[in-house]
Image (tube, rainbow, N blue to C red):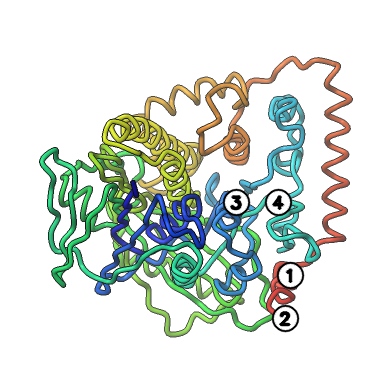
Amino acid sequence: MKTRIVIVGGGTAGWLTAGIIAARHYIKDSPTQNTQVTLVESPDVKNLGVGEGTWPTMRDTLRQIGISEREFLSCCDASFKQASKFVGWSQGKNEHYYHPFTAPSGYGALSMADHWSASTKDIDFERWVCAQGAICDKNLAPKLPQMPEYAFSLNYGYHLNAGKFVKMLHQHCLDKLGVSYIQGHVEQVLPAENGDIASLILTSGEQMLGDLFIDCSGFAAILIGKHYQVPFKSQQHILFNDTALAVQVEHVDNQTPIASCTVATAQNSGWIWDISLQNRRGIGHVFSSDFTTSEKADETLYRYLKNDPFINSQNITSRKIKFTPGYREKFWHKNCVAIGVSAGFVEPLEATALVLIEKSAEWISQQLPRDGSAMKVLAKRFNHLTLQRWQEIIDFLKLHYLLSKRTDSAYWQAHQQVESIPESLQESLQLWRSQAPGLYETNQRFELFSSASKQYVLYGMGFNTMKQTLAQKEASLIKRLLNETRNTTEQLFNALPTNREFLSKIRQK
């Protein structure tokens, strides 16, 4: 019996979900298919067009759905992302730290964080344990041109043009993965007797039958929100930002450096993201409307643009995006699953939007229900796991704010008020004051943020963990690891091309 999957909504969420599921279940040239994936997309709805930063998980995703890395880099104006760089978050000046994608040296064998806490701390934690921040300082690529696709010297994700990425996924899903495509607007949702969705009626009158319906309709949340009325849980009492002003600006010329990291620069009532692609930059100011006005936020954004010599800031108009930070009470209800913005949305501080789509679609592709009884069990498990992930995201984003020593505005002061800090995060902070985040303190198999990520943010922000009495037998290992980090950094300096050089060679082939 064929399982019919209907995805409502295109955009990155819809087409990435279609690609991930179809890549696992589509059998090329087979007269019989066990699974049919159909995507219906309204021609009247514009894609959100944000989510231009990915995690390293995207390398595996692209490989699994059969997309060449060279083709992806060329078609999507993509560049390499090796880290997030946080500027002005701790003191409100020009101080910065990196959250790199490469784990600390010795990770899994011993805790370099404990040893760093016991040291004189005369060097930043990230520089002490990893070469990647120094590589980002020089705008270098994470790999050599002769390396195979998706291989690396340093772990990396991507910056990409979201619109071009959607077009590429769309074409690939239709040409290579057997996905069916219908352009139309959902006019009506017809329920079955048991409360499941039986079919969708389009404005054309066409009826779409399905066994599993995936809601990728963004803020509209046509199925999970409008039809099923699954409540949305606001997290604005924890994460205050609710508005973004986004712009796209051209590089001044084709020799302009392409940054190897997303830059997040703190402001009085929010922060500014800065993402470098091959031909342009995506820049935006995300802020809280409770603490500033759109007009003042716009002024802050344009001041940032004007002070950058590598962009042409003339005749730029920002696009305003309003949102409520939070997520659904349930993500899988009856035979409907919400993925992407329809499931939840928060500011792009750690680029979690695309990785949640990847993780959700991959889980569904592996656990595709074969009957109604399996559906109930899988829905329960998916809801439990996805809720954990959303709560983890909320905690991790809040961590960036509450560690700040800034008191220059009501916004930063409010972030440090205990009533805005989740109890789960308060508990973790209590633990981290006595010991560094460790490999075994939680079940890291399903965690989004590893203990390494927590260490980079904590110690990048100047958090203090109690000094440990360290075993003498580890001293020689620590010395060797530190020497290896220094040597690796020097070797990579000499070997790696810049992002611009690497990507130019790709386009020439």
Among numbered discs 2 and 4, the one appearing first in the sequence:
4
Element carrying mark 2:
helix
Element carrying mark 3:
helix
The Cα–Cα distance between marks 3 and 2, rounded to whole angstroms, is: 25 Å
Circle 3 crowding by C-alpha within 10 Å: few under 14, some 14–19, many from 20: few
x%, y% of residue 355? 48, 49
The residue that disc 3 covers is: 60
The residue that disc 2 covers is: 508
268 and 452: which one is in front?
Answer: 452
Select label 3 or label 4 by which is in front: 3
Q: Is residue 440 left or right of residue 330?
A: right
Among numbered discs 2 and 1, the one appearing first in the sequence:
1
Circle 4 crowding by C-alpha within 10 Å: few under 14, some 14–19, many from 20: many
Q: Amino acid at mark 4?
A: Gly
Asked if residue 267 shows in the view, the reply is no
Circle 1 crowding by C-alpha within 10 Å: few under 14, some 14–19, many from 20: some
267 and 375: which one is in front?
Answer: 375
Q: Do the CB atoms of the residues marked 1 and 4 lie less than 8 Å apart?
A: no
Q: Do the CB atoms of the residues marked 2 and 1 lie less than 8 Å apart?
A: no
Among numbered discs 1 and 3, the one appearing first in the sequence:
3
Give the residue at x 50% y 72%.
305
x%, y% of residue 166? 44, 68
Q: Amino acid at mark 2?
A: Gln
Circle 2 crowding by C-alpha within 10 Å: few under 14, some 14–19, many from 20: few
The residue that disc 1 covers is: 502
Q: Do the CB atoms of the residues marked 1 and 3 lie less than 8 Å apart?
A: no
Among numbered discs 3 and 2, the one appearing first in the sequence:
3
- Indicate which disc residue 133 carries: 4
